Image (cartoon, rainbow, N blue to C red):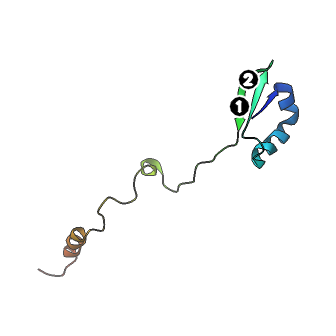
Amino acid sequence: MLQANVLETKNSLSEFLRFLESGKEDCIVIARHNKPVAKITLYDAPAASNRIGIAKAADLYADGWDSPALNGAVASLFEEGE
């Protein structure tokens, strides 16, 4: 953890960002009059998802979607002539 005052942060922001990106520092604390005010950390982007709306949180398939009983029921719907 690196602590810097506001003016030092303003003048060295690019260098501090490189410290975070390289892993030399895990966070940078910005202080005003030597009292911590804010913390800068490396941004951890969430994984991209192609699903939209309510489907983002839903499972793609229901439990038992490939069970023998269900397969038989679907096959009977496609049988010719009864």
Is 21 situated left or right of 10 in this image?
left
SS of the residue under disc 2? strand
Pointers 1 and 2 in contact (C-beta within 8 Å)? yes
Residue receiving disc 1: 39
10, above or below 69, in the image: above
What residue did someone put label 2 on?
36
Q: Which of 31 and 75 is in front in this view?
A: 31
Q: In which quarter of the image is the C terminus?
A: bottom left
Single out the residue that lies furthest toward the right: 11
Residue name at image x 31 percent, y 59 percent? 63
Position of residue 52 in the picture relative to residue 19 (left or right): left
How crowded pointer 1 is (Cα within 10 Å; few <14, some 14-19, many 20+) is rated as few
Q: Which residue is drawn at 48% across and 55% down?
A: 51
Q: Which amino acid does label 1 sit on?
A: Lys
Residue 69 in percent (x, y) is at 21, 69
Residue 81 position in % (x across, y down): 14, 81
Q: Quadrant of the N terminus?
A: top right
Asked where in the image residue 27 lies, by quadrant, the reply is top right
Task: Give above or below for 39 relative to 82.
Answer: above
Q: Residue at x 42, y 47 (%)?
A: 54
